[in-house]
Image: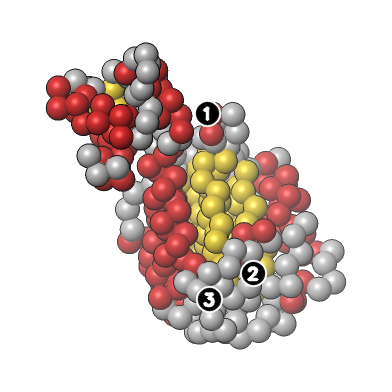
């Protein structure tokens, strides 16, 4: 009882899925993604074993369609299920069993598969596709545009409850130690898709990267305004230097990756956020 899109970005070498449903914590069931393997959406009486098994098959070179066919072959309840697969090369496949509750169906295109069941109508998957194809930006942005378009086209006909996005890219996780680029869930909310979009925007603020052109030197008026904040929030006190106080402040605000630990510069988007937050 869900709608989803799985997709591949050949430029970024990233794979992802966005999903929403009138079902609690849909992100704990449907999305399966692995860099260098692909993405799988497992929904409608979901057999979650299709996720890791499908990714293993695609990582070994199977196409999305071949991997899906192989798993369906030995599933006696396949007609109750729905899946979307996208492989290492962006080839896509979707399957909707005859026992899925209407409206149910899916479609595929170059690098993506859209599918859903218990939907307000066929327009939901069409808008999923249109939202993805007409949007710009990186893969997470396009997946969220697609999900919002499907949601506003009626989405799950029973209502709204949860949404999730999971995007994998080699070494794109926190500090480069894994492939979990974007992994956010809204498990129970009256309007989960916009809230999910807000969470990803928050992620970009805290973990995004700015080039050197967006580094603002902590000198002059900027240094003075930051000094006011550090005093106001009781960081710059006793015999602490600005450098030490700034380091403690940035760590407490979780912006270690977006500012110089020696207090020489800060990324422009983070500076704007902090000035607004602390009204300096």
Mark on residue 160?
Answer: 3
Q: Is residue 121 above or below residue 178?
A: below
Total residue callouts:
3
Q: Name the one closer to the observer, 113 or 275.
A: 275
Mark toward the start of the polypeptide (3 vs 1): 3
Question: In the current view of this chain or complex, which residue is farthest to the left?
Answer: 221
> Is the C-beta separation of discs 2 and 1 under 8 Å?
no
Classify 51 as above or below 157: above
Give SS at disc 1. Answer: helix
Q: Which mark is residue 230?
A: none
Question: Observer-nearest residue: 178 or 5?
Answer: 178
Q: Position of residue 162 (x, y in %)?
A: 56, 67
Residue shown at 37% from the left, 18% from the top: 238
Q: Which residue matches tag 1?
A: 175
Across and down, in percent, residue 20 comes to: 54, 68
Mark toward the start of the polypeptide (3 vs 2): 2
């Amino acid at each position: 009882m869900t709608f989803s899109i799985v997709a591949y970005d050949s430029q970024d070498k990233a794979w992802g899925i966005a999903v929403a449903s009138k079902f609690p914590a849909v992100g704990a069931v449907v999305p399966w993604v692995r860099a260098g393997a692909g993405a799988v959406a497992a929904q409608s009486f979901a057999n979650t074993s299709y996720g890791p098994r499908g990714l293993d098959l695609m990582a070994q070179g199977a196409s999305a369609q071949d991997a899906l066919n192989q798993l369906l072959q030995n599933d006696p309840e396949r007609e109750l299920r729905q899946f979307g697969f996208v492989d290492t090369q962006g080839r896509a496949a979707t399957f909707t069993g005859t026992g899925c509750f209407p409206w149910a169906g899916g479609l595929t295109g170059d690098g993506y598969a859209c599918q859903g069941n218990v939907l307000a109508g066929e327009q939901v998957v069409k808008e999923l596709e249109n939202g993805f194809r007409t949007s710009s930006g990186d893969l997470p942005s396009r997946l969220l545009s697609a999900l919002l378009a499907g949601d506003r086209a009626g989405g799950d006909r029973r209502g709204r409850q949860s949404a999730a996005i999971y995007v994998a890219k080699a070494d794109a996780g926190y500090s480069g130690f894994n492939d979990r680029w974007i992994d956010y869930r809204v498990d129970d909310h009256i309007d989960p898709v916009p809230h999910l979009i807000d969470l990803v925007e928050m992620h970009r603020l805290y973990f995004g990267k700015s080039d050197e052109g967006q580094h603002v030197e902590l000198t002059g008026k900027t240094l003075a305004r930051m000094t006011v904040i550090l005093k106001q929030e009781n960081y710059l006190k006793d015999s602490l230097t600005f450098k030490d106080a700034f380091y403690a402040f940035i760590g407490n605000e979780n912006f270690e990756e977006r500012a110089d630990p020696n207090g020489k510069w800060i990324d422009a988007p983070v500076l704007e956020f902090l000035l607004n937050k602390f009204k300096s």
